[in-house]
Image: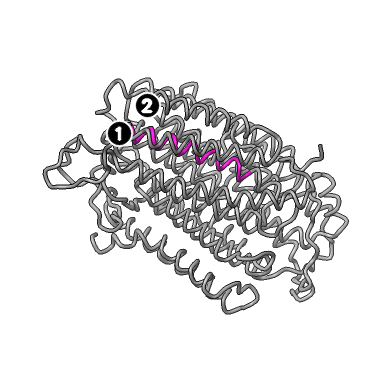
Amino acid sequence: MELTLALAIGVLSASGVYLLLRPRTFQVIIGLSLVSYAVNLFILSMGRLRMDAAPILSGADADIANYADPVPQALVLTAIVIGFAMTALFLVVLLAARGLSGSDHVDGKGD
Amino acid sequence: MTGMNHIAILPILIPMAAMVFNLLVGDGRSNRRIIGINIGFSVLLLLVSILLLAVLAQSSTAAAAVYPLGNWPVPFGIVLVADRLAAVMVLTTSILSLAALIFASARWHSRGTNFFPLFHALVMGLNGAFLTGDLFNLFVFFELLLAASYGLALHGGGRNRVRAAMHYIVINLVASFLFLIGVALIYGTTGTLNMADIARAVPHIAPDDLGLFEAGVAVLGIAFLIKAGSWPLHFWLPNTYSSAAPPVAALFAIMTKVGFYAILRLWTLVFANQTGPELAFGQNVLFVLGIATVAYGSVGALSSKALDRLASYLILVSAGTLLLAVAYNVPGVTTGALYYVVVATLAAGALFLLKDVIDQVLPAEAQILAVSLEFYGDEEEVLDEDQEVSRSFPAAATLLGWCFAIAALVMAGLPPLSGFLSKFAMLSAAFGAANAPTAATWWITGALIVSGLFVLIAMVRNGINIFWTSLPGDGGLALRPLEVGPIMVLLALCVLMAVFAGPALSYFADTAQFIHSPQNYIDLVLPKGETP
């Protein structure tokens, strides 16, 4: 499981960084999305990987060792929401830039 | 101070209320009463900030307003900590935002939609970032201020602004991801997000995890350095700042200081009192970056002919100076740096506003010349229809000239104004520190003095261009009181900071002492008797 997750994060961030460095705005936005997936998975993994464990404590004498860490899950939720909103906003700016410059190059230049 | 603790949340709540108010009443840009209410909110924020500072200045050095949100026990809930450092930054934000808002209410607010709610959202994000004591909450406030700044950078529209804002957004989104990675690594190794709790937990990190923790702090540091405009992560800054609307650019002058504030806070809390290789590594990196930023900013200032671009490079110079001061890691130098951050922010803000006023009164042919010189603008604003309404002042050129001269003196750090005093405070503390002067002392001296010379040359050349060769000579120019007033107030504050340098510096000295002994902060925030 650790290997799978590490590979997923690595592949996502590598492709994301590659796309971020491309000259077309659409590639950049896809790159940003991929990097944000990688970051979200990474945050989740920082709460240690647990299978079949609930994040909510039940019962007064429950053993914490049997539960998953709830904080990274809360953090990831916030990060997803913020990342989503920012991507949407960037999409609008991207369209405005496309309309104003007539090109989808990040510097607004022709091909 | 239990009753006073509630003050800590007011600098966040007031801009939020203003934002909500503006969203409820809709786009009221032509309604004078709504503009007045917006300015009223900003005045209220300024009063609260002054109150916060006054309360802290009168209590003991180690006092701070601690406000646990929702009354959740620290370190499980989010806590706001208004110590002296935060209070200074909040007050600077309030002064600058009030000036920029009054300036904008003359005409800039009507250049696009939703100026007021975005403006207040930016102020709310800034204040929140200064006040929060929680790392993830800092991220949320960063995102809030960035989201508002994206909107404001686009205010006024036009091809240049959209292009600059697009670069700005991409770079800041990447910086946010780095921020998240850093925060996640720190959480993974310390198990907490509360800054005081992190500082407490650092000595107890398992040796195996230490490398991971330091990697996390380094990644977080890169995110902060991007915001602070440090070389080589600053390439977004000159374009964004010089193409933003002037009142927006003036408020942006404090945004790089958020990066500086975050670095200073975490650095002093987590590393400054350690003596291991981490300290030396961090110090060296910050020092080299600081020197490079100052050098780049100075050369950039010399190379820029338009005043707004020059002001952007001045922001870089001040960012580099502040990084140097953090890297020096001596309370006395931090004292000077805190004094410097206030005056440099106010003067840079005034300079961005001044540029707009000068642009309005410059004859058209001089503007075309400036634009073609800089090869930057293809969307220069058409003159307003209400241009004719504003009165013509005699000796207006003299007034503008004085404003420009004061800003130049402060930014270049020449006596007798506050820019000189702040640099002098930093340098005398650097030489007065233990086993001084080291090589670092000479580097910081050289950087501060040579950058001052470069800035002076750039400003003088710009001033000659504007006031001696371009302005019409008859003296009577059309100025708007609403636009010139805030500039004069900002610069008058810079002068007042020099007149009352004694009390100001002693306050900053107490602040520096407080932040350089992190145990104070930890004791203040965490309940007593907390065992690791």
Which quadrant would residue B97 be assigned to in this image?
A: bottom right
Tell whether position B356 is magenta: no
The main secondary structure of the magenta stretch is helix
Q: Are marks 1 and 2 in contact (CB under 8 Å)?
A: yes
Quadrant of the snapshot with the C terminus of chain B:
top left
Residue at horizontal 14%, vertical 47%?
A: A59
Q: Which mark is residue B218?
A: none
Amino acid type of the residue tagged 1 in the rendering: Met
- Chain letter of disc 1? A
Q: Name the amino acid type tagged 2.
A: Met
Residue B95 lies, in percent from the top left, at 51, 60
Residue A51: assigned label: 1
| Whether residue B463 can be seen here | yes
Q: Earlier in the sequence, mark 1 or mark 2?
A: 2
Report which residue position mark 2 lands on.
A1
Task: From this view, report whether residue B170 is shown above or below residue B19.
Answer: above
Give the magenta part as a residue range. B168-188
Colour theme:
one colour
Q: Is residue B431 among the parts visible in the rendering?
A: no
Circle 1 packing at 10 Å, graded few (<14), some (14-19), many (20+), is few
Residue B270 is left or right of residue B91, and the answer is left
Horizontal relation, residue A110 to residue A86: left or right: right
Where residue A2 appears, as percent x and y from the top left, is 37, 25
Cα–Cα gap, marks 1 and 2: 9 Å
- Residue sitting nearer the eye, B163 or B513: B163
- The answer for which chain carries disc 2 is A
Task: Tell me the SS state at disc 1.
Answer: loop
Dot 2: what SS?
loop
- Picture quarter with the N terminus of chain B: bottom left
